Image: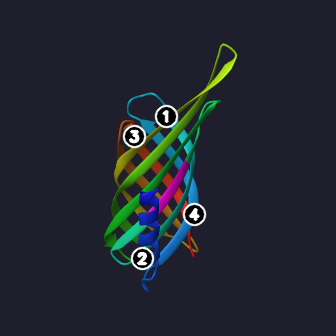
Amino acid sequence: MKIILLFSLLLVSFSNLKSADIYAGAGIIYSDDLNKTSDDLGLELKSTILDRNFGLAGNFHYFFTPANTSFFTLDFNFQINYFRNPQLRLYQLTGINYCSKETLKIEDDEQITIETSDIGLNLGTGLIYDLDGFSLNPEAKFVISDADQLVISVSAIFPL
């Protein structure tokens, strides 16, 4: 909860910058579990605040999983723009990942819910390619945690 509050305060202070660009959008995401317990496809909702050199992003990922299983992640990332022109921004990111998985099992006519969660570190790169009225935002990151993952996403984001 403290992390979400801290991130919210950063977003509010960042949004006061006059040169900041604010984006929101959605896309698809693929997660490759390097421990080979699962590979998942899902949906991504994201918001990003960018100024000339830095950015903050918050992402929610919901994965399509087998029946009786629910899996989602929350990401809070800090971005450093290392290339920027009027149409393209390349950035590196680092941040925090929270993942939650819930599985419902039935044993001896009794329902058992198994809940697991984990906090990890995001390291990755991405770009924002401006098109007419919206931008494409592909991103690749490695999540360092108990469930090490390579995560690839592509989103359409719109300026607010």
Mark 4 lies on a secondary structure that is strand
Q: What's the CA distance linking mark 3 and mark 1?
A: 9 Å
Q: Which callout, 4 or 3, points at the residue further toward the start of the chain?
A: 4
- Kindly check if marks 4 and 3 are in contact, taking CB atoms under 8 A apart as contact: no
Image x and y of residue 99, in percent: 47, 44
* Side (left or right) of 109 relative to 6: right
Q: CA distance from mark 4 to mark 3?
A: 23 Å
Decide: is 72 above or below 116. below
Callouts 3 and 1 close, C-beta under 8 Å: no
Amino acid marked by disc 3: Gln
Q: Secondary structure at mark 3?
A: strand
Q: Residue at x 44, y 37 (%)?
A: 32
Q: Main secondary structure of the magenta part?
A: strand
Q: Secondary structure at mark 2?
A: helix
The answer to if 62 sits in the magenta stretch is no
Crowdedness near tag 2: few (<14), some (14–19) or many (≥20) residues, C-alpha within 10 Å: many
The residue range painted magenta reads: 57-61
Q: Nearer the viewer, mark 2 or mark 3?
A: 2
Question: Which sits earlier in the primary sequence, circle 2 or circle 3?
Answer: 2
Q: Local crowd at mark 3 within 10 Å, few (<14), some, or many (≥20)?
A: many
- The residue pinned by badge 2 equals 14
Q: Which residue in the structure is indicated by mark 3?
A: 149
Q: From the image, state whether disc 2 or disc 1 is nearer to you.
A: 2
Q: Earlier in the sequence, mark 1 or mark 4?
A: 4
Q: Is residue 17 above or below residue 81?
A: below
**Real-space Cα separation, disc 2 to disc 3, in angstroms:** 29 Å
Give the number of the mark in front: 4 or 2. Answer: 2
Residue 60: give x, y in percent of width and height. 53, 54
Q: In this orientation, does residue 142 appear? A: no
Label for residue 39? 1
